[in-house]
Amino acid sequence: MGTRERDGDLERLIPLSITDTANRSNLSSPYNSPTASGAGSAGKEAFSKVIRSWASKKFMTGCVILLPLAITFYITWWFIHFVDGFFSPIYSLLGIDMFGLGFVTSITFIFLVGVFMSSWVGASLLSLGEWFIRKMPLMSYIYAASKQISAAISPDQSSQAFKEVAIVRHPRIGEYAFGFITSTIILRKSSGSEELCCVYVPTNHLYLGDIFLINSKDIMRPNLSVREGIEIVISGGMSIPKIMTIMDSQFIMSPRVVTVRDEDEATIELEGTTLQVSTGI
């Protein structure tokens, strides 16, 4: 019994080994506890999410900047190749292989056509060609639609199909639609005459649309040119200015000249159309 008691006292007096102390200290460390390991993994996951979000945003920013430039250069390069292909075969037969020469020749040819068609002889030949095209069943519709669109953006103000940009209430109260004023007419009624504007409201870019006869006083005319209005329609409204000013309709009504011949009759000239109005009772 005395020997066993001595051994127990010796074990109590002998210090623990360094290995056991280190193991116990590691187990009792707050960094190695289950809670600490979970917090560390959550922090790494949050950091990785921030990095991924930052990288995706920068990548999308690069796409937004480079995509319009890439599309512009691609369309321009395609257009140059397309126009260059008209006269390149001719130069190839002559043994001349120079890129861009066909493009320059095509641009020069288009310019000369414009100069020639501006003359009396060119206008006569164009009228004759249009007469033949109108006799063809399918081509007449295609040519008429294409000519109207070309006339809308023509630099010749006298031949523009679209006179002004208009904003009309359509299809219901509180909603507005972009349109183009194409002509102005006088509607005679028993109660008197009313000036109406023919407004073309595109529904599918510029090729298809609806035609409305609207009182000129009910049309809002923004401070936009016809070319700017076409850009707004084609771009789906992305090029619309942030602020638009509506012009006063009394200063932009269709020009008219009133000539009073006598007490019972007056002549009104409206856009080249002469109307005789009886003023007698």
Image: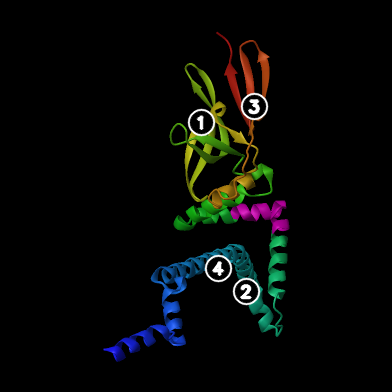
Q: Amino acid at mark 1?
A: Ile
How much space separates mark 4 and mark 2, taking CA atoms? 43 Å
Looking at the image, which residue is at 29% across and 89% down?
2
Let me know if residue 135 appears in the view. Answer: no
Magenta segment main secondary structure: helix
Q: Tell which circle, 3 or 4, labels the residue nearer the N-terminal end.
A: 4
Q: Nearer the viewer, mark 1 or mark 3?
A: 1
Q: Nearer the viewer, mark 3 or mark 4?
A: 4
How much space separates mark 3 and mark 4, taking CA atoms? 67 Å
Give yes or no for contact between labels 2 and 1 (Cβ–Cβ under 8 Å): no
Looking at this view, is 33 or 13 the one in front? 13
For disc 2, the marked residue is 85
Give yes or no for contact between labels 4 and 2 (Cβ–Cβ under 8 Å): no
Find residue 227 and report its horizontal and vertical position in percent. Answer: 64, 47
Q: Nearer the viewer, mark 4 or mark 1?
A: 4
For disc 1, the marked residue is 214
Find residue 116 and report its horizontal and vertical position in percent. Answer: 71, 57
Q: Secondary structure at mark 1?
A: strand
Q: Tell which circle, 4 or 2, labels the residue nearer the N-terminal end.
A: 4
Looking at this view, is 267 or 43 the one in front? 43
Most distant residue in the left direction:
1
Horizontal side of residue 24 vs 89, given as left or right: left
For disc 3, the marked residue is 269
Looking at the image, which residue is at 71% across and 80% down?
98
